Amino acid sequence: MEWQNPPDADVILRASGGKEFHAHKLVLSLASPIFRDVFSLALPTKTEPAKPPIVDVHDPPEALEIFLQIIYPMRNPSINDPQTLASVLRLADKYDAKAVLDARKDYALSIPIDPPPIHLYVVFSACGREKEAEAAARRVPFTSLAVLSGPLLPLMTVDSRTLPTADRVHGY
């Protein structure tokens, strides 16, 4: 990956499990007011002369890696499953970086994954991304509710306003 371990990195994000991602405070701060606030606080001094300070973020490393690929000005990363997409969208919420994802119009619907549209609907609904959920719902055959897999069920809410109806799905 082009962005990983740049020689001029000035911070290391340490994800769950200890995986480290070398990054630039400026890029993170521009993408996220949360990171900007973190970096405005005193960070620990460098752990070694040649090593930037470490910030423990306790995020899943797979989702953090994709999130970083999105906020760095690189090509769109590959997201392989709806659960990873949900994790990345949650990180965008956690770090208040929604504008980064929103700036890339239709990013979430153009990612190179091919789950059933109902899976995308569930993920987008659970993550509060109504426009993407509505677009996914338009592609859902009404009979496909039966294909929901076990890992996606916890993402679903009981709120009937978020469930697809025949008129929302088929545009009647």
Image (cartoon, grey):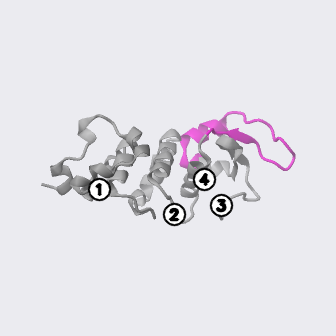
**Marks 2 and 4, how far apart in space?**
12 Å
Label ID, residue 76: 2
| Residue span colored magenta | 29-58
Occupied quadrant, residue 15: top right
Say which label, 2 or 4, has the lower sequence index.
4
Residue on which disc 3 sits: 3
Q: Earlier in the sequence, mark 3 or mark 4?
A: 3
Does dot 1 land on a helix, a strand or a loop? helix
The kind of residue on which mark 1 rests is Ala
Which residue lies under the disc numbered 1?
Answer: 135
Q: Secondary structure at mark 4?
A: helix
* Nearer-N-terminus badge (3/2): 3
Query: What's the amino acid at mark 2?
Result: Asn
From mark 3 to mark 2, how far is it between C-alphas? 12 Å
At a point 69% along the width and 47% down the height, the residue shown is 19
- Closer to the camera in the image, 143 or 115: 143
